[in-house]
Image (spheres, rainbow, N blue to C red):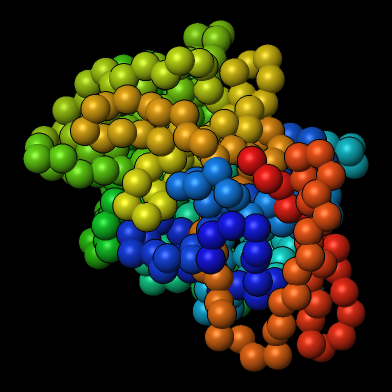
Amino acid sequence: MKGLLLSCSLIAVALLKVNYAADSKIFLATGVGNLHSELIDPTTKENNCQNTPPYPKRVTGAVGGVINDNTTPLVCGGFPYEEGIVYTDLCYTFDFAENRWSPSDIALTSPRRFGASLTLPDGRIWVTGGQGEAGTTASTEIFENGTFGPGPDMPVPKEDHCIVQLDETRTLVGGGGPISTSVFIYDWSTQEWEVKSPLRLGRRGLSCGKFETSDGLQVIFVGGEGEGYFKKTTEILNVDNDKMVAGPEMEKENYGAHMVEFEKELFLVGGTDDFFSTSDILKFNVEAMTFELTEASLKEPREVFVSMIVQNDHSIRGLLRKTTKATSGECSKTLTRLSVGGTRDLQDCER
């Protein structure tokens, strides 16, 4: 349901699948600063800005996905910079019904920060690369059957790279640090890596997403940092003929954003231009090959964070909503009552 009302119960769906239900949202957590988690719909300015609590630790460079039959966000690892340590293996889960983060018995097999992750089509979570005790790593981990275990090593160590699911059997990883141009595709059916044409410019902190044209399957690599500065340039790989070409430029440099496929469109969410984090959400117009500023925006500027997709579930029994609005400035408070008892004030933003 679009607008200001949001059920407190949600069911998560696997990241980067194409056919989302009409009520799906993007769930964002962690990032630079003590940020609240957030639910957004990038297709409308009438975002559901539920003021969910911050992640329990001030963490950047974490990884995550959805577990428990796609009902529970799981966030792990990262750089908990307030605690005097540089990486962690700890995980937390988020309960939408309780609007609460909780420590998890799940843990990464090794502490890492600035890795890249996604939920595979079969529901497993794949965590790749990052920095750990031995420096930048080529190791990966797979979450299945309630625990993390070793996954296929990447051909080279990577951190701060991007990852995108191409189809049911192929996953692409590209760029990253140390400043890298390498691009690889892992085929889960053959369990082999394929080397693709490299990026024209080394990039770390980049974003990437896939789209189709009449020329075949394409992947766009967006922004990032390299050669001492943040980039507003992009590059596009034709996966079928393995040609890498320059893509359209953005108006501003961007580092640490997420490119999310949502309702068959690509959106670039958040990031920083080196001076300020942004709350902007850009839509990539495939036909025009341009980035367009949407009417939607984040409640809080955000960079180097975790994103996943969740779907509003109206079928859960025992949940009643009764809402009143008392507008004050740009925001209003929504009182959500649960039939199981208790009330909770949720902060909703009017754009």
Whether residue 300 can be seen here? yes
Q: Is residue 38 left or right of residue 254?
A: right
Residue 136 in the image: x percent, y percent? 58, 35
Residue 179 in the image: x percent, y percent? 49, 21
In the rendered image, the vertical position of residue 106 relative to residue 264, given as above or below: below
- The residue positioned 31% from the left and 43% from the top of the image is 210
Residue 207 in the image: x percent, y percent? 46, 34
Residue 237 in the image: x percent, y percent? 24, 32
Q: Nearer the viewer, residue 215 or 262?
A: 262
- The residue positioned 72% from the left and 77% from the top of the image is 321
Q: Residue furthest top?
A: 228
Quarter of the picture containing the C terminus is top right
Q: Is residue 111 left or right of residue 194?
A: right
Whether residue 132 can be seen here? no
Rendering quarter of residue 131 = top right
Q: Is residue 236 left or right of residue 338?
A: left
In the rendered image, the vertical position of residue 221 relative to residue 111, given as above or below: above
Q: Nearer the viewer, residue 178 or 259?
A: 259
- The residue positioned 63% from the left and 16% from the top of the image is 274
Q: Nearer the viewer, residue 241 or 260?
A: 260
- The residue positioned 72% from the left and 66% from the top of the image is 94
Number of numbered callouts drawn: 0
In the rendered image, the vertical position of residue 228 relative to residue 57, given as above or below: above
Q: Is residue 246 left or right of residue 59?
A: left
Rendering quarter of residue 211 = top left
Q: Nearer the viewer, residue 305 or 310?
A: 310
